[in-house]
Image: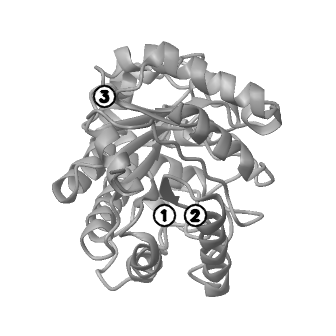
């Protein structure tokens, strides 16, 4: 007797023997997912909920990454729209009843109440550095590096306060909203002279705190090492992060699943396909996509593998392409 899709994904994460390799893909639902603010315009949340519901019921994915379009802003008056460190360093933790907590928990609960019995659900969260990047336009890495150079200790304080709030949200999403786990998006910082030791000192402690908090409530959490818009990461910077599943930009980084598995000590790997309109998942034929699915699994094996993409896929990707991946993975 076949297990549910939810159990199939949990078994894949636990690297048990499974009847087929699961897969999952996702995309944004708002035209401007970064700068839209559903805290101020709750109708945007309705749009995202309708979109994700239509996708779940139409494409029938093996699991759900709960998209958080409109919830990217960290709703703290010392942070939203603020670019200068002199103001940022005054940041205080949010109260438990802040909309940043309660609105997101309510949104997640709408999805888990409707689909959580049948599907594993992973709520999208961002690390503090990425949250600060959303606060400005232009080169995000250069902006963060300028803050570090201005006053490293003040910058670390800002990151730590944000990380603590994200960690609190992660715990509450799992405990109160019933999500299976979190999907934590991170990026290494690319700047001249910036090293792994610098990252370990400045960024890693808060990021690890978030994962630690999530792991206290659920062991089924995902770390996404984001290669959005071609951002390059040194994957080894994240190899000691305590998380069961790693999703990285296999195509952008040039690090296929079987190589990444070695970097991350054999932990469950999510991905394999490129996510751009120039990539096979978007433009390929049924025969091409099925052949690529089989090639990926031949090279990486079937244990500890969940098929997906480097990052969000184009909004107009034909959902049939996802089904072709699923069908080929079952053959």
Task: Name the image quarter holding residue 300.
Answer: top left
Q: Position of residue 233 (x, y in %)?
A: 53, 25
Task: Please give the residue where the numbered disc 3 appears in the rendered image.
Answer: 267
| Residue at the (36%, 29%) spot, across then down | 238
Q: Residues within 10 Å of mark 3 (few under 14, many from 20)?
A: many
Task: Please give the residue where the numbered disc 1 appears in the rendered image.
Answer: 87
Q: Position of residue 292 (x, y in %)?
A: 66, 23
Q: Evaluate if marks 2 and 1 touch, with contact meaning CB atoms under 8 Å apart.
A: yes
Residue 84 seen in render = yes
Q: Residue furthest left?
A: 216
Cα distance in 3D space between marks 2 and 3: 38 Å
Tell me if residue 226 comes above or below residue 26 in the rendering. Answer: above
Task: Please give the residue where the numbered disc 2 appears in the rendered image.
Answer: 82
Q: Position of residue 315 (x, y in %)?
A: 76, 54
Is 279 placed left or right of 184 in the picture? right
Tell me if residue 326 comes above or below residue 75 in the rendering. Answer: above
In this view, the residue in front, 81 or 314, is 314
Task: Name the image quarter holding residue 327.
Answer: top right
Provide the secondary structure element on which disc 1 rests: helix
Residue 252 seen in render = no
Q: Residues within 10 Å of mark 1 (few under 14, many from 20)?
A: few
In this view, the residue in front, 196 or 172, is 172
Q: Residues within 10 Å of mark 2 (few under 14, many from 20)?
A: some
Q: Which badge, 3 or 1, comes first in the chain's sequence? A: 1
Cα distance in 3D space between marks 3 and 1: 41 Å
Tell me if residue 86 comes above or below residue 38 in the rendering. Answer: above
Instruction: Select label 2 or label 3 by which is in front.
Output: 3
Q: Evaluate if marks 3 and 1 touch, with contact meaning CB atoms under 8 Å apart.
A: no
Is 200 placed left or right of 118 in the picture? left
| Residue at the (61%, 79%) spot, across then down | 45
In this view, the residue in front, 320 or 82, is 320
Is 292 placed left or right of 329 in the picture? right
């Amino acid at each position: 007797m076949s297990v549910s899709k939810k159990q199939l994904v949990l078994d894949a994460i636990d690297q048990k023997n499974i009847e087929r390799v699961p897969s999952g893909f996702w995309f944004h639902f708002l035209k401007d997912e970064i700068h839209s603010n559903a805290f101020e315009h709750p109708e945007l949340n309705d749009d995202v909920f309708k979109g994700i519901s239509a996708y779940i019921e139409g494409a029938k994915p093996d699991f759900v990454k709960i998209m958080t379009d409109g919830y990217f802003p960290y709703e703290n008056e010392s942070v939203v729209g603020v670019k200068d460190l002199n103001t940022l360093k005054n940041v205080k933790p949010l109260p438990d009843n802040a909309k940043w907590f309660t609105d997101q928990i309510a949104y997640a609960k709408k999805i888990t109440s409707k689909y959580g019995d049948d599907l594993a659900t992973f709520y999208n969260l961002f690390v503090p550095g990425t949250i600060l990047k959303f606060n400005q336009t232009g080169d995000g890495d250069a902006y963060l590096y300028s803050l570090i150079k201005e006053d490293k200790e003040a910058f670390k304080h800002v990151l730590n306060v944000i990380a603590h709030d994200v960690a609190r949200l992660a715990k509450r999403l799992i405990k109160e909203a019933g999500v299976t786990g979190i999907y934590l998006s991170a990026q290494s910082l690319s700047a001249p002279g910036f090293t792994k030791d610098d990252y370990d000192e400045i960024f890693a402690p808060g990021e690890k705190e978030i994962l630690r908090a999530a792991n206290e409530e659920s062991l089924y959490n995902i770390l996404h090492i984001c290669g959005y818009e071609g951002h390059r990461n040194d994957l080894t910077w994240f190899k000691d992060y305590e998380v069961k599943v790693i999703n990285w930009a296999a195509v952008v980084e040039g690090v296929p699943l079987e190589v990444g598995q070695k970097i991350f000590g054999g932990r469950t790997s999510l991905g394999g396909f490129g996510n751009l309109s120039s990539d096979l998942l978007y433009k390929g034929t049924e025969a091409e996509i099925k052949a690529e699915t089989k090639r990926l699994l031949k090279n990486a094996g079937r244990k500890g593998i969940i098929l997906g993409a480097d990052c969000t896929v184009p909004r107009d990707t034909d959902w049939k392409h996802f089904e072709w991946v699923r069908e080929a993975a079952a053959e």
